[in-house]
Amino acid sequence: MKPLAVLVEAALAGGNVLKGYFGGDFRISYKGALNLVTDADLASEKEVVGILKQRFPGTAILAEEAGEESGDSGLRFIIDPLDGTTNFAHGYPVFAVSVACEQGVEVTAGAVYDPVREELFTAARGKGAFLNGRRLGVSATKRLGEALLVTGFPYDVQEDLTGNLRLFNRFMGVSRAIRRDGSAALDLCHVAAGRFDGFWEEKLGPWDTAAGALIVEEAGGRVSDLAGGTFHYRNGAIVASNNALHEQMLALTL
């Protein structure tokens, strides 16, 4: 069975778990002052990990809640069982399940599922990106002044408000508008779909970007670190764009 097919199976199953909890009663715990975890995170992750291990025994896992687990299958799955937990906890319908497959040092497949809109974003390296089976392509916007951008803020935003707002202030001064939806995985997918022209964020976890970054690249976009170097999901800081805007965005992130 191909990894992408398993990613899709796992993401859909995790999304169905989230649907069952959304709008109902669930327990909220705190990993930090602003960093939440709910029963839904844990239940979704259990479902996703269970499917991946069943389909690929001995696989390595990197999951937001359970952490890292070694394996000998040659594959590693990187999992965010609920990207947008704060949204979910408040009943705001913007959240997703994100699952990526890494072989060697390269992410080779990714799936992000938005269970509210029933939108499944997928990509396999070298084979394009898709939304519910329809090929995706980034926007054609060429000027930052005409761009709709999206970003997010880290959980320590209140500890260093000036530092964490510095890039937001720069981009706000030159772009058409900026949105902040609270799910990096979906932000990246919406860049791939041409809904946003560019995205940047700092202090992200590997599970936030592993699948979405590949989906952007396979849709014709560009992904880098803040200095324009090669992006890796462990970097924590990312710039993603429709490619045409990338150098203009990097001029503000340095």
Image (cartoon, grey):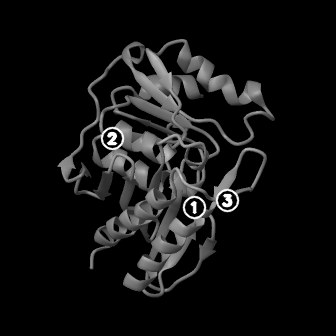
Label disc, if present, on residue 192 of the rendered structure: 2
Residue type at numbered disc 2: Ala
Residue type at numbered disc 3: Arg
Q: Is mark 2 on a helix, strand or loop?
A: helix
Distance between the Cα atoms at labels 2 and 1? 25 Å
Q: Which image quadrant is residue 196 in?
A: top left
- The disc, 3 or 2, on the residue closer to the chain's N-terminal end is 3
Q: Mark 1 points at which residue?
A: 41
- The disc, 2 or 1, on the residue closer to the chain's N-terminal end is 1
**Relative to 167, does residue 226 appear above or below in the rendering?**
below
Label disc, if present, on residue 27 of the rendered structure: 3
| Nearer to us: label 1 or label 3 | 3
> Residue 202 at x, y = what percent?
61, 40
The quadrant the C terminus occupies is: top right
Q: Is mark 3 on a helix, strand or loop?
A: loop
Distance between the Cα atoms at labels 3 and 2? 34 Å
Question: In the rendered structure, are the residues bearing label 1 and label 3 in contact, judged by CB atoms less than 8 Å apart?
Answer: no
Horizontally, residue 150 falls left or right of residue 87, namely left
Q: Which residue is pictured at 43% across the width and 44% down the height?
A: 186
Q: From this viewpoint, is residue 155 visible?
A: yes
> Residue 85 at x, y = what percent?
58, 50
| Nearer to us: label 2 or label 1 | 1
The quadrant the N terminus occupies is: bottom left
Distance between the Cα atoms at labels 1 and 3? 10 Å
> Residue 118 at x, y = what percent?
32, 51
Q: How dense is the environment of label 1, judged by Cα within 10 Å: few (below 14), some, or many (20 and up)? A: many
- The disc, 1 or 3, on the residue closer to the chain's N-terminal end is 3
